[in-house]
Image: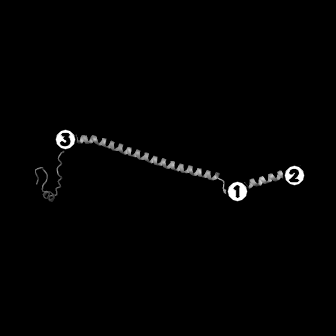
Amino acid sequence: MLDEEGQVADKRQLLSAGLNVAPSKKSKLPKPGEMEKKTMAGSQAPMVRDRQDAKRAMKERQSRMVEAQLEQAAKRAADEEDEERKKMERAAKSRKTEGEISDAKARYVQRKKEREMEAAVAAEGKK
């Protein structure tokens, strides 16, 4: 049995006889308005893709710039910390300890006493 469009309506008769029928394909001719829409959509698709690619590229550039700035800031902070540490080491190295100061004073006093004794011996020898 066929319907108005030429398709099989009751497939039981066909299947019992061993016939397999596929529905007939109608040729689809695009309507005039559809053709214009498709061409416009097709021409806009590359533009949309280009715009999306440009946005993606800009986002990547910005993220790389931010990453570079963070690296520079971290490097700058590490350099400043290293410089401060070196400065403290130099200052600690140049400082004399209490023991060193007292030893130097004792040597000075000893040399002064020795000169005074030599001067006293030389003065007695001239008399």
Which residue does the image show at 48% across and 48% down from the upper left? 73
Above/below status of 109 relative to 39: below
The residue under label 1 is: 102
Which residue does the image show at 61% across and 51% down from the upper left? 91
Disc 2 is placed on an element classified as: helix
User: Three-letter amino acid code at disc 2?
Assistant: Glu
Give the farthest residue toward the right.
Answer: 127
Look at discs 2 and 1 and give the one toward the viewer. Answer: 2
User: Three-letter amino acid code at disc 3?
Assistant: Gly
Q: Residue 109 location in percent, x, y?
A: 75, 54
Residue in the foreground of this view, choosing between 45 and 54: 54
Disc 3 is placed on an element classified as: helix
Residue in the foreground of this view, choosing between 68 and 87: 87
Give the colouring mode of the picture: one colour
Give the farthest residue toward the front.
Answer: 127
The residue under label 3 is: 33
Task: Say whether disc 2 or disc 1 marks the residue closer to the N-terminus.
Answer: 1
Q: Residue 39 location in percent, x, y?
A: 24, 40
Task: Say whether disc 1 or disc 3 marks the residue closer to the N-terminus.
Answer: 3
Q: Residue 45 location in percent, x, y?
A: 29, 43
The residue under label 2 is: 124
**Mark seen at residue 10:** none
User: Three-letter amino acid code at disc 1?
Assistant: Ser
C-alpha gap between disc 2 and disc 3? 135 Å
Residue in the foreground of this view, choosing between 63 and 26: 63
Which residue does the image show at 19% across and 41% down from the upper left? 33
Look at discs 1 and 3 and give the one toward the viewer. Answer: 1
C-alpha gap between disc 1 and disc 3? 105 Å
Residue in the foreground of this view, choosing between 37 and 123: 123
